[in-house]
Amino acid sequence: MGGKQRKEERAWFDLEVQGSDFQDTRLRRRFAILLEKLWAGTGQTIPFACQDWASTNAAYRFLSNDRVSEHDILSGHFQASAERVRATDGPVLILQDTTTFSYQRERPELIGYTGKTTLRTGKNGTGPRQPLTQSGILMHSNLAVSADGLPPGLTAVKFWMGKQFKGASELKRGKGKLALD
């Protein structure tokens, strides 16, 4: 990787972190450390990216901290995305997507239920259908894309878990409109 590209990546990283909106500067500093580890280990799980138990434990403590919200974590990215959109020549499309992240858990009520489906049983899925209640997270996101196909970034994202799903089914069916800041 060339020095110029590394500097550009570092500038991008710093812009994303500096724009974050944490209540406490210590939380921003911890976020920067965690983001650096996740960036260096792109595609890895948190334990692999953090590489040791102390860093992994610190990452999970940070993410479960009551004073850290999804807004705090994403605010820097949204601000940087807005600046990149303003700097883009020509039209910018905002692509919207609603995605369900499904998880199998021993205690699905801890994460929430996303809906019901049927599962084919038997070899190669040729057996009878069995009802299945899915658990997971619902995410609706807006991604800005330039006419050249370059993505300046996410402009909005909303997550639902468990009891927060009220109204989400209408959104998935396209019957409701969701205003995202």
Image (tube, rainbow, N blue to C red):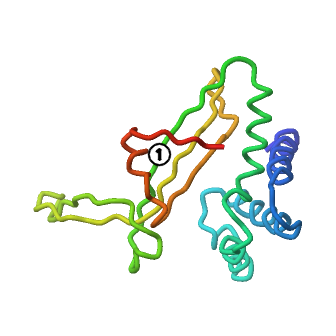
Give how far across and how far down residue 26 sits, in percent. Answer: 87, 70
Q: Is residue 49 visible?
A: yes
Q: Position of residue 65 (x, y in %)?
A: 70, 75
Report the quarter where the C terminus lies. Answer: top right
Q: Give the number of callouts.
A: 1
Give the quadrant of residue 100.
bottom left
Query: Toward the viewer: 124 or 151?
Result: 151
From the viewer's perspective, is 14 left or right of 168?
right
Q: Is residue 170 left or right of residue 122?
A: right
The residue to which callout 1 is attached is 98
Name the residue nearer the viewer: 48 or 180: 180
Q: Which of the 4 quarters of the picture holds residue 68?
A: bottom right
Q: Is residue 53 left or right of residue 143?
A: right
Q: In the displayed structure, would residue 87 be above or below residue 71? A: above
Q: Residue at x 60, y 38 (%)?
A: 143
- Tell me if residue 51 can be seen: no
Locate the N terminus and report the quarter of the image it occupies: top right
Q: Secondary structure at mark 1?
A: strand
Residue 113 location, x and y as percent? 39, 66
Identify the amino acid type marked 1.
Answer: Thr
Q: Within 10 Å of the Cα at label 1, are there few (<14), some (14-19), or many (20+) other Cα atoms?
A: some
Does 148 appear above or below 64? above
- The structure residue drawn at horizontal position 63% and vertical position 73%, both measured from the top left corner, is 47
Residue 81 in the image: state x and y as whole percent. 73, 39
Q: Quadrant of residue 71?
A: bottom right
Task: From this view, report whether residue 70 is shown above or below residue 10.
Answer: below
User: What residue appears at the point 80 percent right and 54 percent down from the top-left corner?
Assistant: 20
Q: Residue furthest top?
A: 90
**Which residue: 63% across, 21% down?**
147
Observer-nearest of 141 and 36: 141
